[in-house]
Image (cartoon, helix red, strand yellow):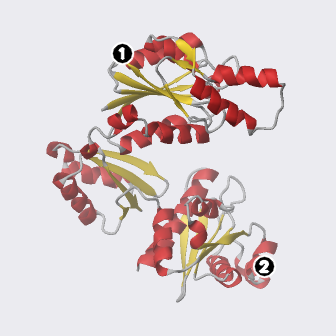
Amino acid sequence: MRAALVVTGTEVLEGRVRDENGAFVAASLAAAGVSVDRITVVGDGLEEIESVVAQALQSGADLVVTTGGLGPTHDDRTMEAVALAAGVPLRLDERALEMVRAAIATVPARASEEIREQGARKQAILPAGAVALPPPGTAPGAVLRAGDAVLVVLPGPPWECAASWDAAREVPEVAAVLDADPSAAPLELRLANVVESEFMQAIDRADPEADGLVVGVCARPAELEVTVRPPGATADEFVAFLEREFPGAIFSRDGSTVEQVIGALLAERGEMLGTAESCTGGLIGARITAVPGSSGWYAGGVVSYSNAVKESALGVPASMIARFGAVSAEVAEGMAGGARERLGCDWSIAVTGVAGPGGGTAEKPVGLVYVAVGGPDQVEVRELRLHGDRERIRMRSSTIALHLLRSALQA
């Protein structure tokens, strides 16, 4: 099955807002084995949206998904454009109107009742024959047939888009596309500490295309995401080849992130984790707490950006910092030990480094980072020499630190 996505919004087209919705829906479709042919970003003009949606329908896509432009204001034109592209009239949907009124009633009034009702009625006008989706905010999405294709219209704010997409997946017409070929869903592998160029050389030797496989590779900081389709015996043989080429590198076979893998390991052991972060500024804690249920295995963290906080909150001796410097293996080890002791945890992660762009010296250049993992038996410290801008150094540091913990838990 094939899909086309249309992301609307002049603010996205001009780069003022980053598109999250296209990537989110595309990843969901790919996981279901649906091939995404195109993602088109278009402004808020009615004719622009109509033209792009019509082109997507004419391309032969089985599913066309739009995001954005469903609010009560004058420039929210997606429903009108979709109706024009599908060749159906617009009409007031009474079920949608009830849902919108109920949603608006939960929002503190900032306009007159008349204005609120006008906004509700605008948002409840849908293409004839459409199935209204419950509005996560105030704007309902919709699902409708357009010839041989299924059209899904989703709101623009990312959290609303995600919630509406979950609802749309339950609509029979959409479910039929997603469930058409379960065997088309790819294997989703994640590998740690493998350089993309080395991986591509291995693929050249294996030549999976000759065996009818399609292998996708996406480089992430300190990781590779690899998809293999179609699944089956041949794909399993290719995975076995990767295991021989890169022993221990595959840490996830179902797309689980390193944070999720760590969470499962800690939950199974009944143990707790704490973090102490300097240059990563809480990034590790943010990644961990993004995992549902992490409160069961993550106690919390200390962002010890200053030396004073390293001393007071984590108990790192001032003499140690004065002797070795805040960016040192000794201080990283002290932070890890302090986090375990002060937070009452079984395990800890600590990071200290120079993320840049300033602050580096000849002795301790930008990209020098120390990560430490403290456990019941010992503390392991690793020195990193990283390259890139500030954000890349911070992200790579957090990922490597998490993998250092994962390896310790799996030892």
Above or below, 194 relative to 126: below
- The residue drawn where x is 65% and y is 58% is 355
Name which quarter of the figure residue 360 lies in. Answer: bottom right
Q: Nearer the viewer, residue 388 or 138?
A: 138
Instruction: Kindly state the secondary structure of the residue where label 2 is placed.
Output: helix
- The residue drawn where x is 45% and y is 66% is 261
Distance between mark 2 and mark 1 Cα atoms: 65 Å
Binning the other alpha carbons within 10 Å of mark 1 as few (below 14), some (14 to 19) or many (20 upward) gives few
- Does residue 203 appear to the left or right of 404 in the view shown? left
Name which quarter of the figure residue 199 lies in. Answer: bottom left
Residue 347 makes an appearance in the image: yes
- Does residue 272 appear to the left or right of 144 in the view shown? right
Residue at the disc numbered 1: 58
Instruction: Kindly state the secondary structure of the residue where label 1 is placed.
Output: helix
Q: Which mark is residue 311?
A: 2
Above or below, 29 relative to 394: above
Q: Nearer the viewer, residue 67 or 312?
A: 67
Query: Residue 112: x, y in percent?
Result: 84, 25
Above or below, 395 relative to 88: below
Disc 2 or 1, which lies upstream in sequence?
Answer: 1
Query: Residue 142: x, y in percent?
Result: 51, 28
Query: Residue 4: x, y in percent?
Result: 41, 27
Pick out the residue farthest to the bottom: 377
Between disc 2 and disc 1, the foreground one is 1
Residue 194 makes an appearance in the image: no
